Amino acid sequence: MTGIRDVAREVGMSTASVSRALRGLPGVSPATRHRVLEAARRLGYVASPQAAGLASGTTRTIGVVVPFVTRWYFSWIVQGAQDRLRGEGYDLLLYNLGGKESARERLLATRYLAKRVDALLVLALTPTPEEQENLRSWDLPVGLVGAEAPGFCCVDIDDVGVSAQAVDHLVELGHERIAYVGGGLEDTLDHRAPRLRAEGWRAAMARHGLPLVPGYDEVGDFTMAGGERAGERLMELADPPTAIYAASDEMAIGVLRALRRAGRRTPQDVSVMGVDDHEMASFLDLTTVAQPVYEQGEAITAMLLAALRGELAAESPAGSPAGSPTNQGSATRRTFPTTLVVRSSTAPPGGTG
Amino acid sequence: MTGIRDVAREVGMSTASVSRALRGLPGVSPATRHRVLEAARRLGYVASPQAAGLASGTTRTIGVVVPFVTRWYFSWIVQGAQDRLRGEGYDLLLYNLGGKESARERLLATRYLAKRVDALLVLALTPTPEEQENLRSWDLPVGLVGAEAPGFCCVDIDDVGVSAQAVDHLVELGHERIAYVGGGLEDTLDHRAPRLRAEGWRAAMARHGLPLVPGYDEVGDFTMAGGERAGERLMELADPPTAIYAASDEMAIGVLRALRRAGRRTPQDVSVMGVDDHEMASFLDLTTVAQPVYEQGEAITAMLLAALRGELAAESPAGSPAGSPTNQGSATRRTFPTTLVVRSSTAPPGGTG
DNA sequence: ATGAAAGCGCTAACAG
DNA sequence: CTGTTAGCGCTTTCAT
């Protein structure tokens, strides 16, 4: 395994100079740099990240903690992050909670990650106060997507507003009996979105003076299968809704299937809409509230990179330069807009075609 | 950042003993080990992976190179890998090629990864001979999924057989005009599956004495959108097929949409089937050839872990113990079975209902 | 512009 | 069973 000493020997210089030349640091004559680069290339030399990291105190790695890898939303955030990272020389360590509490404990409650990464990205998970305290003590940039906490970079959408857009659309069409399909207890525990979307639904219903019919608040677990079961239950109600608003497209798709199986037509008998604008939504002509997922992944990663470059005033001294957007401590916050996308899964109630 | 010396000081012992105690190595009295563990816990000590790695020559990390993170297939392989890794103390470094040649070059043609990981997993990509040579010189376990090369652990399915299963099913139903929707030039370049599935389709057609109608070999790029375009083109043909076999469910779904838009009914007018058994396939009642994706991810990772434990005879000496499955050099190979899943998107041709 | 020397925080060999 | 002594392969002062 050719090391820096081999390169140094090759060009007859010290390892220190080779190191400087290779990293493009100032204080190296152009001629020397050229010779070093040439020799390194010829020998196929690549610096050991371990040794470099140990000596410099960095890892050139960012960690990403996701609840699930296989869900559309998370994979696109990761994609956005990857694309931003590309070319910056940072590698991405992926940690999958997969619903396991133990994994969360090890990652968020010990200093394990603190020694492995230069920055951390946590998706769709609101750290507990203790976890937040711990993360802050690591003294590295932490980014949150779909969550918020003081001192961290945050990127999100207005989840209450998402529900408002959905309910407003359905009400405008003339619906009054609007059911909601959201997450289960587990989902709403420390994932903000399910909770806020449910609240948003209730608030919007109230704003329109509409009743919250018992049984209209269903659990879909953010999966297609869960959405399907929720749809079945809703159709078994004595007074089924004329419209169903699911907090994700995947659940909405499950609902669509339940309706089809129950012999209900969409949208003539029941209107259905979701959230996300999943690729499949356009295929199924599902009305939805679109959110820019990939862009959120890019944005949070850009913030992290900026923080790593020291571009975000760490611990923002008393007289911080006003003007810039929400910038508390070393953190920045950005809320992305969502858009109603009307397709043909929603229509006025009681329609005949 | 509390280090091993702090722990050593705390218990009044040498760092060497603390290191041994912490890692569960033999040669430490139970009492001592207990005191050390206790002190480490109290101080919140976690060993620096960088330093430990530098000293021990390992990284406790495996690298995974994927062409895309957002595709169903890859995310499930990664999920399978994660689940196998969990508890083994290995972290996962995710590298996304994202179609960029430059990324591939850096990862597979330099020794960069060799210094960052203990083992490498490459998905759906057949390394070029040069890349193979390079990878072998790294002298670490390398696993391939959906590809094969001598000296590497391989996990795959019988892609030619997949097409045979599909075509046989359609022929059994009475179809003769069977079109294929596969990858484009780029896909078939060094991804084995698209190429083999196309070959399998041709072979199966020939075996049944069926003609390869010009225009029946379409490009779907393994995406829904691509499948939709392919479906459109097929329906514009003077003599459109009565059945369409797409090499992936996502493309098949695109085809379904194209048919619907063209006013063709499925399966009455045109039968459609895919490959994978994507979650969406069951929702859309799509006939498909199912492959165990998650299990492939688990299996290849298990092989890598076994190799890391030294359980696979490295460089298998001349008189290797016969009997075990395909085991060349330090590599193992495993081919998973695929299953025809008949749903209602396929039916005899010319059906009226 | 370059070199020498001193670590970074661990683990590994070898003593005892 | 435990401690001592060397590094692992770089980066970083501090000289020169």
Image (cartoon, coloured by chain):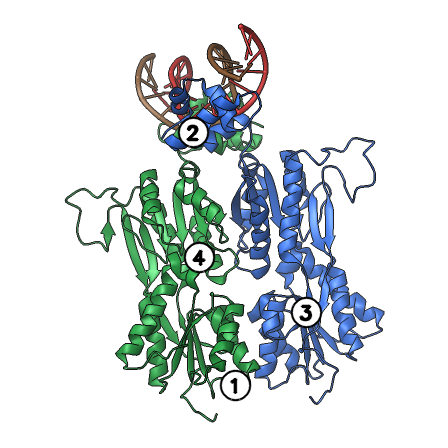
Chain colours: A green, B blue, C red, D brown
Residue B351's tag is none
Image height of B286 relative to B353, above or below: above
Which residue was labeled with disc 2?
A: B38
Q: Is residue B127 visible?
A: no
Callout 1–callout 2 Cβ contact below 8 Å: no
**Within 10 Å of the Cα at label 2, are there few (<14), some (14-19), or many (20+) other Cα atoms?**
some
Chain letter of the residue carrying label 4: A
Q: Amino acid at mark 4?
A: Ile
Which residue was labeled with disc 1?
A: A264
Instruction: Tell me which label, 3 or 2, sits earlier in the chain.
Output: 2
Image height of A221 relative to A343, above or below: above
Q: Amino acid at mark 1?
A: Arg
Residue B197 image-quadrant placement = bottom right
Gap in angstroms between the C-alphas marked 1 and 2: 62 Å
Mark 4 and mark 2, same subunit? no
Q: Amino acid at mark 3?
A: Thr
**Within 10 Å of the Cα at label 4, are there few (<14), some (14-19), or many (20+) other Cα atoms?**
many
Gap in angstroms between the C-alphas marked 3 and 1: 27 Å
Q: Indicate the secondary structure of the residue bearing disc 4.
A: helix
- Judge from the rendering whether residue B149 lies leftward or rightward of residue A233; answer left or right: right
Mark 1 and mark 2, same subunit? no
Gap in angstroms between the C-alphas marked 4 and 3: 29 Å
Q: Residue A79 at what x, y percent from top left?
A: 47, 55
Residue A77's tag is 4
**Within 10 Å of the Cα at label 3, are there few (<14), some (14-19), or many (20+) other Cα atoms?**
many
Which tag is nearer the camera, tag 4 or tag 2? Answer: 2
Which residue was labeled with disc 3?
A: B288
